[in-house]
């Protein structure tokens, strides 16, 4: 089995998938952070391709940065200066070649995540 990484972002304040939200993926190696790619969620709140495809999978530490502030601005959420949530970083480890799913449940004032399936 090959490993790969996916996500799903839901806007819990509006009760809809978070479409148009930019996500950056980084690989963490010691004190260095290497940008691997940027993707944007589709109408279902998912990316059109795996965030980290099987052909590029390696075990290790990674970070997803969800650009929540820009999404909230674009979705019409009343602005604050500064926004309570702007960039939401989630750092996690992938220790074996498996399907890792890191969903984000997002509102203007909070978020949660978990290892999904």
Image (cartoon, helix red, strand yellow):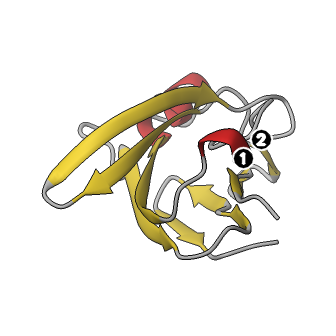
> For numbered disc 2, what is the local secondary structure?
loop
Is residue 75 rendered to the left or right of residue 30? right
Measured along the vertical axis of the image, is residue 89 above or below residue 16? below
Query: Which residue matches tag 1?
Result: 54
Q: Residue furthest right?
A: 44
Q: Identify which residue is drawn at 75% across, 73% down.
A: 116
Pick whichever, 59 or 12, lies toward us: 59
Q: Is residue 77 something that shows in the picture? A: yes
Residue found 68% across the figure and 61% down from its top: 103
Residue under label 2, please give it: 45
Q: Nearer the viewer, residue 82 or 17?
A: 17
- Left or right side of 83 for 68: right
Q: Residue at x 80, y 29 (%)?
A: 48
Name the quadrant of the C terminus: bottom right
Q: Is residue 87 above or below residue 114?
A: above
Residue 6 in the image, given as x and y percentages of width and height? 72, 51
Q: Nearer the viewer, mark 1 or mark 2?
A: 1
């Amino acid at each position: 089995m090959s490993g790969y990484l996916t996500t799903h972002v839901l806007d819990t304040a509006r009760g809809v998938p978070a479409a148009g939200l930019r996500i950056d993926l980084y690989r963490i190696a010691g004190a260095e952070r290497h940008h691997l790619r940027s993707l944007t969620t589709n109408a279902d709140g998912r990316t059109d391709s795996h965030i980290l495809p099987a052909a590029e999978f390696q075990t290790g530490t990674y970070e997803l940065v969800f650009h929540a502030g820009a999404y909230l601005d674009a979705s019409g959420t009343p602005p604050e200066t500064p926004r309570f949530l702007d960039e939401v970083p989630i750092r996690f480890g992938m220790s074996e070649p498996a399907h890792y799913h890191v969903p984000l449940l997002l509102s203007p004032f909070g978020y949660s995540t978990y290892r999904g399936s």
